[in-house]
Amino acid sequence: MRSVQRSIHPLDSRNLLYALQHAGVPCVNSLHSLLCCLERPWVFGELKKIQRRLGADRFPLIDQTFYPSHRNMVIDPGFPCVVKVGPCHAGYGKIKVDNRCDFPSRGFSE
């Protein structure tokens, strides 16, 4: 498995991951790592640990800001920016915001 997808019907492959774990099938990438990759904030946190160990010059990452809910979002990044909502992959749940005025008009605010 290259990655495990969820929340994109009918491409949710978690059941396959669970079946491989239940059957004890050996894999090149650990099934635990695939399970952790279901949550992108978790992955980014692990990458930040590597960056702290190696240094930002040797292990650069694109800055991200995580909000636990859309209600907590304070949009003050450089524009344009990409806003991702939810756990979907492959371009789902993402939108480009060109300026501060675009953010509320795209349906993210209450």
Image (cartoon, rainbow, N blue to C red):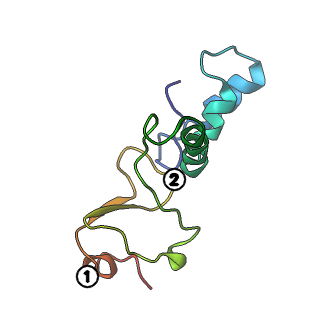
Q: What residue sits right under mark 1 in the picture? A: 101
Dot 2 falls on a residue whose secondary structure is loop
Residue reaching furthest to the bottom: 110
Q: Amino acid at mark 1?
A: Cys
Q: Position of residue 55 (x, y in %)?
A: 51, 39
Image: 2 above or below 78: above
Q: Earlier in the sequence, mark 1 or mark 2?
A: 2
Residue ID at (58%, 37%): 50
Residue 73, above or below 47: below
Type of amino acid at the residue the image marks with label 2? Pro
Rate crowding at label 1 as few (under 14), some (14 to 19) or many (20 or more) other CA atoms within 10 Å. Answer: few
Whether the residues at callouts 1 and 2 have beta carbons within 8 Å, the answer is no
Toward the viewer: 34 or 47?
47
Residue at the spot 51% in from the left edge and 53% down from the top edge: 87
Q: Which mark is residue 87?
A: 2
Q: Is residue 11 left or right of residue 28?
A: left
Q: Nearer the viewer, residue 10 or 73?
A: 73
- The quadrant in which the C terminus is found is bottom left
Determine the CA span between mark 1 and mark 2.
25 Å
